Amino acid sequence: MHKVLIVEDVEVVAELQILMLIRAGIAFEARRVETLEDFTRQIEQSAPDAILYSASLPQFSGFAALAKAQILCPDTPFIFVSGKHDETAAATRRRPGSDCVFTTTLADLPATFNRAVKEAEERRKKKSHESAVMRLTRMYAEQAHDLEQLQLQQVILRKLSRFLKASATPAEVYAAIECFGPQLFQRTVGKLYLIHVPGKHLETVASWGDKSPSDQAFTIQDCWALRQAQPHCIREPHVELLCRHIARNSDSAPPYMCVPLFAEGETLGLLHLRRTKLGSNLQETRGSGESGMNLATVVAEETALALANLKVRDSLHEQSIRDPLTGLYNRRFLEEFLSRELVRADRKKHPLSVIAVDIDHFKRINDSLGHGAGDIVLRRVGLLLQGFVRQSDIACRVGGEEFSVLLPEATMPIAAQRAEDIRKAVQELKLKYEDHDLSGITISLGVAAYPDHGATPDALIRAADQALYEAKYRGRDRVASA
């Protein structure tokens, strides 16, 4: 049923219009108004399907009624009824937006009404279709933009992953996070914390988006993410439970998320992201909301894996250059270190000395008391050697009961005196194994120096070994120089 608003000051004329529409079989309900105020109120209360204007009111002309109708209900047909308004209607047809304006006589009113209502319905369907097309176009454009952003995000994430895997030091891992973090999490402040084992507190190792001094260190108990061993995301700080390391400034706390770093069952640290003042909505920025949490989790996992791999790599490297029994460096490290030090000594024209050490009659200890006693002697001699080396020196176990001490920038006399001090210290060792006294341990030492006794690692080690054999030949428990 159509709703019709009739603007007419003569009730009989309005009734004639209603009668013409009824005779034409048109189902409708009509309301009559005479003033602009009533006209406006009726339209605001219920937008009509058609407006009939046939009044002759100087204070409320057809132009005034049409202008108000085009503001309040621009798609509603406006029909001028009666020939007296032909000039007005013709003028309105020449105005922009007059597709909804019609002029007719009382006799032709039903036909004009049907045509006006039909055209209005077609216009509404067309606008609805166009609106739907626009919505779909906008939706597809947004989806295309989101897809483009996702692809860009994946490219950046792959770059970060490559750099993390290729990092040779923790510092390079931190640099990669500081480089790609702002690209992945736009308009955020980001911090990477690592757990400092002695006190179980967290310290900042990488950050972006905030040039202010680093936050104070905090403990695992200050962060819900670390305590629950799962990400903790806060979107509405005023109504959610904040971490204690954030709650200290809760009056102005922005949305944030904390993501723990785990590797091989160990908690390594924390990735913390918080919205900057420019990012007012947590959902409006790449790296926010649920997708942001997933992305942050991936970054945390990649970072933890990279740090864990470095730790394993360092551990394996340390094992490969250390003697497991004494904790001293092994022959492999001695050769590598000696090669580097000889190059440095040649460049700076500095001396360099090597002491070769061998425990006297060590086989007797193993044969008479067993390898357990021999291990005690080796460990104690190794520990003693560590006490006689400077920070720049190294002590190595190069085989069985053989040791070497490398003394960069030490002359032959200095090295010989150091060897003599070591010999006396070993002589004074008082060791016991089970019920057996292991006192009387002695060592023989050979000393050689660069460049007098060799310019290459092999030559210098051979010279020290030859001096060691000389000490053995002369009765052991003594120092011999090359």
Image (cartoon, helix red, strand yellow):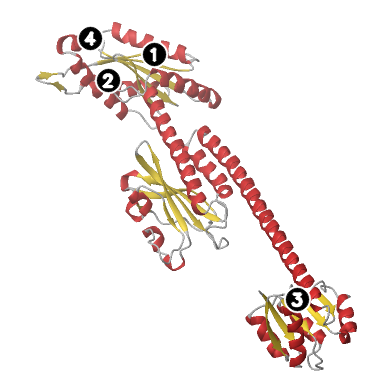
The kind of residue on which mark 2 rests is Arg
* Type of amino acid under label 4: Lys
Tell me what residue is drawn at x 38 percent, y 26 percent: 394
Real-space CA distance between mark 4 and mark 3, rounded to the nearest whole angstrom = 128 Å
Marks 2 and 4, the one that precedes in the sequence: 4
The mark found on residue 464 in the picture is 1
The CA distance from mark 1 to mark 3 is 126 Å
Within 10 Å of disc 1 (Cα), the crowding (few <14, some 14-19, many 20+) is: many
Quadrant including the C terminus: top left
- Left or right: 277 as drawn, with respect to 266: right
Q: Is residue 412 above or below residue 102?
A: above
- Along the horizontal axis of the image, is 395 left or right of 341? left
Residue 182 in the image, given as x and y percentages of width and height: 56, 50
Residue 92 visible to an observer of this rendering: yes
**Residue picked out by circle 2:** 423
- Residue 366 or 427: which is nearer the viewer? 366
The residue positioned farthest toward the top in the image shown: 473
Name the quadrant containing residue 328: top left
- SS of the residue under disc 4: helix
Q: Distance between the residues labelled 1 and 4?
A: 22 Å
Q: Do labels 1 and 4 touch, CB within 8 Å?
A: no
Label 4 vs 3, first from the N-terminus: 3
- Residue 351 x, y percent position in the rendering: 47, 23
Residue at (46% x, 60% y) in the render: 235
Left or right: where 53 falls relative to 186: right
Provide the secondary structure element on which disc 1 rests: helix
Which secondary structure lies at badge 2? helix
| Residue 363: image tag | 4
Foreground disc of the pair 2, 4? 4
Residue carrying label 3? 24
Mark toward the start of the polypeptide (2 vs 3): 3
Q: Which residue is drawn at 27% across and 26% down?
A: 383
